[in-house]
Image (tube, helix red, strand yellow):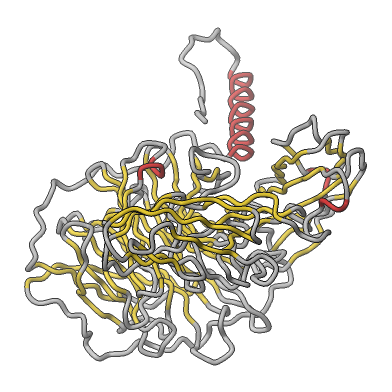
């Protein structure tokens, strides 16, 4: 949205008081408009001091040092859990700064993403929940591990999610917005908005972490996207590239493994250091441990990284899930005021998911010589005060409905939705001021909403409802079904459809990363899942999946769908569930 403030048209003369009143009124209306829409009149203050291209020198390396004491910006409650881990931090030419964090979710959703702004890069203002899962979709359990980049007039927010209980088989998703605090629209596989589709889909063996934790850099017109890939064959950081057009997710191309994550290294935040012409990965080593610290890796081409430095001195012990402050395009310069953000605890047992967050100023320098991945032997410092008491009066950071999915009969009327507001501890309180709720985006031929209550009209279908309260947003899905037997989980399941998640594969003899054939199954009770003979999502006893290979001299497929290439050629695999519903995929082996 473009904000137009003022006009160059010549106006007739007015009295001083009339002109002053008009000016005040105009400014007030403009302020209200900006507050309601989130529109920035000028957009973020971008940098204009990009350095000339530098040819990277393999003999020149980057060294970091902690500067000053860590600043604890978030503390969990002593009597509960809480966190703001994995920050993505963006700073601007005017000294201001934006930061996004993983927070706990609400109502069965594991994680959400929150946002804070600082005018001076030091003191941060109020927090706001800006991204939550889309109900009954591919990101229905979580939105976490934010990685943000700004280009082409949009903030692109990458995140991790899954449809599998237990936090495995994760995928990478992306949402975008004109404003850092939203509202965001998610990539749907062919455009922006609606139900999300992964931009990176994890297709290997189940029951491992999968793909997630994205980080972006734009360099010389190329978008580099880095992400974790944990599978039965190891744990790595991978890289994919694309252009920077609005539909760039459609052209993401896998470029290779940047490095292997050993020594309990976590996700990486990548920056392009203009002074050296190098890509630098900022990550943690020995995460959660007493000897945890910052670990740097370097790359001349943005694809292949090598170890550079291990630093604990001046940082809090037991740190993990680190991010580094960067310019909107993911660049940094040696002269920039840089800091890292990380989660930490006291290392005590029973403190999983109970983490404070610190911002730590760092300096970078270039030096000639050998990399220093072993460190200097100096460990970090123990934080004495990292827990807090729950405040009596807490600000609102978000809203949520009691249920994200509502199912109705045709003609059912005045069904109360019910909302809560959430404080920084993610404690929920009944939202009583429901008259200020604004509902939009839904199909008014299917439902109507009045005074926070839904009435279904005499038709069946589904629609998404966008909800706004002051500066906070959420959404919910409404399904109108013919009968109770069609409500999710209300009746005995039968298979309605079974389609391939991926319809064709290309493999090489001897390759280590082996894909898994999965089918998207939809049931008569309107539930759905991915099926591959795993009880995690679909009962193997009730809905067994079979794999029949047309030529077993070319490949074989395990009982849970893992493809092993044997010799060059082509074959088909017929995949059936419960004997009746089936599809065919093609496999080419080189």
The picture places residue 589, in percent across and down from the top left corner, at 30, 57
- Asked if residue 258 lies left or right of residue 400, the reply is left
Which residue is more in the foreground, 507 or 195? 507
> Residue placed at 9% from the left, 65% from the top?
58
Q: Position of residue 420 (x, y in %)?
A: 77, 58
Instruction: Identify whether 15 is placed above or below 50.
Output: above
Task: Give the camera-side residue of 304 and 21.
Answer: 304
Left or right? Give the position of 483 relative to 358. right
Depth order, front residue of 99/233? 233
In the rendered structure, the answer to whether residue 493 lies left or right of residue 300 reads right
- 141 with respect to 51 (left or right): right
Residue 499 position within the rendered picture, expressed as x and y whole percent measured from the top left: 57, 50
Q: How many marks?
A: 0
Residue 323, relative to residue 184: is it above or below? Answer: below
Q: Is residue 528 visible?
A: yes
Give me the residue at 49% from left, 43% from top: 189
Image quadrant where residue 430 sits: bottom right
Which residue is at a point 84% across and 54% down the rendered structure image? 432
Query: Based on the displayed image, in which of its 4 quarters is residue 590 positioned?
Result: bottom left
């Amino acid at each position: 949205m473009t904000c137009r403030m003022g006009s160059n048209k010549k106006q007739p003369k007015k009295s001083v008081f009339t002109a002053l009143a008009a000016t005040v009124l105009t400014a007030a209306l403009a302020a209200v408009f900006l507050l309601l829409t989130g529109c920035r009149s000028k957009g973020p203050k971008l940098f204009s001091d990009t350095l000339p291209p530098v040819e990277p020198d393999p003999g020149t390396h980057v060294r970091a040092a902690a500067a000053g004491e860590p600043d604890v910006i978030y503390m969990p409650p002593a009597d509960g859990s809480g966190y703001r881990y994995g920050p993505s931090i963006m700073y601007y030419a005017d000294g201001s700064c934006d930061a996004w964090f993983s927070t706990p979710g609400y109502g069965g959703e594991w994680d959400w993403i929150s946002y804070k702004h600082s005018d001076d890069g030091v003191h941060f203002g109020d927090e706001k929940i800006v991204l939550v899962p889309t109900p009954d979709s591919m990101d229905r359990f979580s939105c976490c591990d934010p990685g943000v980049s700004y280009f082409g007039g949009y903030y692109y927010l990458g995140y991790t999610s899954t449809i599998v209980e237990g936090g495995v088989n994760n995928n990478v998703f992306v949402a975008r917005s004109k404003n850092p605090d939203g509202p965001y629209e998610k990539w749907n596989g062919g455009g922006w908005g609606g139900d999300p589709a992964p931009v990176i889909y994890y297709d290997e063996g189940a029951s491992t972490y999968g793909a997630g934790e994205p980080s972006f850099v734009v360099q010389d017109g190329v978008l580099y996207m880095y992400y974790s890939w944990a599978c039965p064959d190891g744990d790595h950081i991978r890289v994919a590239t694309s252009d920077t057009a609005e539909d760039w997710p459609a052209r993401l191309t896998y470029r290779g493994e940047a490095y292997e994550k050993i020594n309990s290294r976590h996700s990486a935040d990548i920056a392009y250091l203009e002074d050296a012409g190098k890509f630098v990965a900022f990550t943690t080593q020995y995460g959660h441990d007493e000897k945890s610290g910052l670990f740097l890796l370097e790359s001349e081409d943005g694809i292949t990284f090598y170890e550079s430095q291990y630093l604990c001195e001046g940082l809090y012990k037991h740190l993990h899930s680190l991010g580094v402050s960067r310019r909107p395009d993911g660049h940094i310069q040696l002269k920039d005021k840089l800091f890292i953000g990380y989660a930490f605890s006291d290392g005590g047992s029973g403190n999983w998911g109970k983490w404070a967050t610190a911002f730590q100023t760092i300096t970078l320098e270039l030096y000639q010589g050998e990399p220093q991945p072993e460190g200097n032997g100096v460990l970090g410092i123990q934080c004495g005060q990292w827990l807090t008491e729950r405040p009596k009066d807490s600000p609102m950071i978000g809203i949520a409905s009691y249920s994200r999915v509502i199912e109705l009969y045709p003609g059912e009327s005045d069904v109360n939705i019910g909302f809560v507001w959430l404080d920084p501890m993610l404690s929920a309180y009944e939202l009583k001021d429901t008259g200020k709720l604004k509902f939009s985006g839904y199909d008014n031929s299917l439902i109507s909403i009045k005074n926070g209550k839904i009435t279904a009209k005499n038709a069946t279908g589904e629609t998404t409802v966008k909800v706004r309260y002051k500066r906070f947003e959420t959404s919910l899905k409404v399904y109108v079904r013919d009968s109770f037997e069609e409500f999710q989980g209300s009746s005995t399941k039968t298979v309605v459809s079974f389609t391939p998640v991926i319809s064709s594969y290309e493999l090489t003899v001897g390759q280590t990363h082996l894909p898994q054939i999965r089918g998207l199954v939809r049931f008569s009770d309107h539930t759905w899942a991915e099926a591959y003979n795993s009880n995690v999502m679909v009962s193997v006893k009730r809905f067994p999946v079979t794999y029949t290979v047309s030529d077993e001299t070319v490949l074989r497929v395990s009982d849970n769908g893992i493809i092993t290439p044997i010799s060059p050629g082509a074959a088909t695999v017929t995949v059936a569930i419960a004997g009746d519903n089936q599809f065919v995929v093609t496999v080419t082996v080189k």
